[in-house]
Image: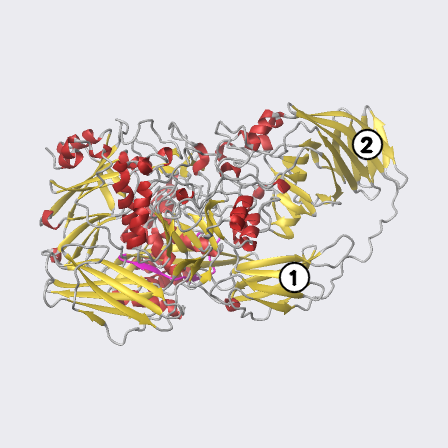
Amino acid sequence: MKILLTLVTGILLAVGARAESPEAVARTFFDAYVKLRVSGLPGEEQMKTFSPLLTPELAGLIAAARAEQEEFRKKNPDEKPPWIEGALFSSLFEGVSAYRLGEPVVGDDRASIPVYWEYTGDGQTSRWIDVVSLVRAGDTWKVADIFFCAPWDFRPGPTLRALLSGRE
Amino acid sequence: MSALASLLYPGGQPCWEFPELFRVAKLPPHASTRAWEPGTRLSLDGDWDFHLAKTPDAALKFVESPGSWESIRVPGNWQLQGFWDKPHYTNVQMPFSDQPPQVPELNPTGVYRRTFQVPRDWRGRRVILHFGGADNTLLVQLNGRAVGLSKDSRTPAEFDVTHLLRSGSNELIALVIKWSDATFIEDQDHWWLSGLHREVFLYTTPKYHIADVDVRAGLTDDLRTGTLDLRVSVDFGGAVDAGSRLEVRLLDPKGKPVFKKPHVVTDFCNGDENRPAWNRHLGRVTARIPRVRAWSAEQPHLYTLQITLHTSTGMQRDVRRIGFRRVEIRGRDLLINGRRVMIKGVNRHDHDDTTGKAVSRERMLEDVLTMKRFNFNAVRTSHYPNDPHFLDLCDQYGLYVIDEANIESHAYAHSICRDRRYAGAFLDRVMNMVERDKNHPCIIAWSLGNESGYGPNHSAAAGWLRQAEPSRPVHYEGALWGPDADKNPDRKIEWDDQPFGTDIVCPMYAPIPVIKEYAAKSKKPRPLILCEYSHAMGNSNGSLCDYWDAFESTPGLQGGFIWEWIDHGIRTKDARGREYWLYGGDFGENPHDANFVCDGLVWPDRTPHPAMWECKKLQQPVAVEPVNLKSGRLRIRNRQDFTTLAWLRGTWEVGVSGRVVQSGKLPVLKTPPGQSETVSLPIRPPALASGEEAFLTLRFTTASDTPWCEQGFEVAWEQLALPFRAKAPGTRLRQPPATLEEKNGVLTVTAGDLVVEASGKAGTLTSLRHKGVEFLVSGPRVNIWRAATDNDGIKAWTGQESKPLGRWRKAGLPEFQVTGRGVSATRNKDGSVTLSFQSVATARGGKIGHHHSYTVHPNGEIVVENDFACDRTLPDLPRLGVTFILRPDFEHLVWFGRGPHESYCDRKRGAAVGLYRGTVTGQYVPYIVPQEHGNKTDVRWMELADPRGRAIVFAATDRLLECSASHFTANDLYAAAHTIDLTPRREIIVNLDYAQRGLGTASCGPDTLERYLLPPDDYWFGYRIQFR
């Protein structure tokens, strides 16, 4: 891993020093996600942590989804609104327990990082990979999307953006 | 008149029917880069204005007097973004009847428009407009001025737009014509999808700039010393700019400088011997790097090359990652870094089920991670250079690549390759590929294209390659057949005809005996690597294990590339919101090739098919062979080429009937690549009850995190049956005898809590009640039919007469009828009662007599025997066995046999024997065209239980069973064209088979081997039924 970090660092140095690496941003994001045990869409308080780490487009989609959720709740007080529960930021609805970031793939203004997830529940452990997509934003990077890549057909959708924009 | 008119009709001739015209004002191809200096690149991806015209002329008119614009996402394909032109799929045949180079008059043409502002600090600098890929013919206009034209849809088109830019808003228009003369050489097996499908951006360089970088990073004969031959092409626009210099730094994989001080080049020579250019000069650096860390797919060590150009017009930096490795052919071996590397490959198209040919980087990364995790080590970029980002990933994560030129003239395979009008385009496409991708260490061979016959146009391209880029072998399947293949298609395969066109004997779908014969008899030995094999359409990849046995035991055979990676389904939803995937013909297009586009190892959402586990097992880096199992001695063989086994940790366990009775860790293995070591495990003879077996299972997991998997990830496993047997059979308890009654033609046998009923009229059992609970909906009947797999025959196609499905249809197997011919009962001396039935399955092509008997023992166990007598007039059978229909409650499934995924007699090495649990519903495998699935082989027993634990158990007697349990009948599946056509039945269909036919790969390639067939003959098989 040390070697990989150095490698990535080498590339980053080559294209100019950055205040924050995509890996650092992703780590901050997922550390918070695991720690806050977010279920469904993040609440307002939780979004204070996440918003600075997200692209405006993704933050906007979350805000729009929350508004839609509220609207649904008003219109259908007895029904469960969309995106109210589950680990929406990963392939497994049930939740996440721990993660590890894989080797980042950094190019021009975009970066992709594999996220090795683990979830233990009911005595069983599930492991899978998602890929987080980041874009450069000045001196830092922002989470633009999460690609759900687990090898099962009950993923919440192809990507977080697709999920939130109602393609799923 | 629009400036585009001059490009659209050069010399008055339509540019889209002009094969000699494939580039206008397009910059020479050059090596792609991914590391841009901040502020030197401006992405133009995103939403563009768009209009889809019916013809290029109508598009031109629209440009001249625009109407209302719609919006389109770039990169993308317009067919998948709601416009009137729909996706169209054909394989070999062209989608229209026009002859080359003419194309249909209705020729959808996309007009793309967007505006942009050039950053202020780009003023005075050179600005390049880059289109990563445009399908098919691209014409560009900027600020009302014609820019240029390009046709190769899978490599970049770059134009120098410096002099066309203005301050403030710039208007860019791109015209993309769907059909052109180039369509005939892009007749690949995938959807016809059009538009700007790869990224579009502007970038800037100083006036005097790096035009290209050619990195030749190899190894000396000692294979430990790196050789760097760097050729930096600098464009000074004329004479060398005085005082200019290049600085070259190299960082090792840890980021440490390799050179004590940078190499500085101040002498520039006039071009390259293979790339002379009047305004370009070459700066060259050569160096040797002792103790270099060589690149391989196993250990993809990448160095960072930093090139800085200083001229009077500014400074430019180029940063790229390079790898030192050596590719060569010696005799019949393809050597990478001196080792004969077995190619564990797969063919990959760019495909996304929503965005078509525009594949996100994250999905590409997902592909690479999945390939690595399933032990693939190579990719053929069928049938065009894949997105360059994919090659970056292959460099970084370690996959060997055969890069293929964007040439396929399949429908006119033997004519276009000789058509002089297309000679330039052939050469251009090979050059575009090589120049874009030459610096990728992952690329181990260049392919001249696919399925385009062989002619002088190929020889011209091969000739250029051999001189301009001799560091990698040339690969082209068409060259195996020679120039006259079309005149004598039945002649014997020789494969040695045109060695100029290929250094690798790379046939597609060649049967195992044929490749073995070639390896044994060829007089001009070259490595044989199948460019396509084991066609993965639907439930497939039967006999893959036999290919691997051949590869590993036959000198000269060096693996191959499975066809293909992904099902190219297009995601949609029905009116009820159910998602499914569309294939050829679903858009109303004609002609089409139906679901032949869905022939991948992963579904369109990239979920692995069950066959992937077979690939993983066969390609795993470790082999375990018994030396003396009783004493626990095993030979562990390292199947890798460059890495010891120290990165893996081994564990072992002895299992009996699904229970782990002994376990332990293997010693830390340091087995060198290609070698073996012997280990001794402290295995003790386990206590075995009657009928029990013991299995030794070894698992190899990663000792620590790797770039593509986490610590503890299972990379390999092996299972060996231990030679221990139970000492004595168990004894049956004496119990009251079973009773027999007959009333109104119904025979009733009672044994303890079990009541069995049968009638002569039904010709089978009619009731199985245990403790008052009824299990049966209908009793066991002979079954010979399975829902045809794509390999049995493609349901949507005609012309399947020679396929198994054709034979089965001709013999009427899908409509076979079973008639009962009475029942008899016998009281046996041991207290059991035997019910015997005669029935017959009748199809047009013959009959199968079925004698089946059920001996109900006093202990409530039923011993079943089946005798089948098949008319020899029948064809080979899909399956032979019996089908029960159980009540819906018995949803919980447990079996002891191979699993957890489906397995078939010719695809079961990737499924270990074990105790598996699931649900009947969970056995469904959603192949895009519904077909046979969910089979289990080598089953010792299978149990179906209700939520209260009441269960029926089917257990093998003399011969292990093949079984399945499903909510679909074979005919439910056979009648369905898409997954949404299926409605699961409540009841449970249980198949117990003597055998099912193997899967083979006959949808495109050889059928399964003879030993996996089920010829019409006499067969016997038995099983026991127990209740809990």
Q: Which residues are magenta?
A: A90-109
> What chain is tagged by disc 1?
B
In the displayed structure, does residue B559 sit left or right of residue B195? right
Provide the secondary structure element on which disc 1 rests. Answer: strand
Quarter holding residue B369: bottom left
Quadrant of the snapshot with the C terminus of chain B: top right
Badge 2 element? strand
Which picture quadrant has residue B324?
Answer: bottom left
Side (left or right) of B558 relative to B463: right
CA–CA distance between discs 2 and 1?
52 Å
Q: Nearer the viewer, mark 2 or mark 1?
A: 1
Q: In this view of the protein, can residue A19 be seen by the observer?
A: no
Question: Is residue A99 located in the magenta-colored stretch of the structure?
Answer: yes
Q: Residue at x 55, y 59 (%)?
A: B716
The quadrant of the image that shows the N terminus of chain B is top left
Q: Quadrant of residue B274?
A: bottom left
Can you identify the residue that label 1 sits on?
B626
- Color scheme of the displayed model: secondary structure
- Mark 2 Cα within 10 Å, few/some/many (few <14, many 20+)? many
Three-letter amino acid code of the residue under disc 1: Pro
Which chain is mark 2 on? B
Residue type marked 2 = Thr
| Camera-side residue of B464 and B988 | B464
User: Would you place residue A51 above or below residue B666 in this image?
Assistant: above
For residue B872, which numbered disc appears in the image? Answer: none
Q: Residue furthest bottom?
A: B260
In front of the other: A30 or B895: B895
The residue singled out by tag 2 in the image is B748
Magenta span dominant secondary structure: loop
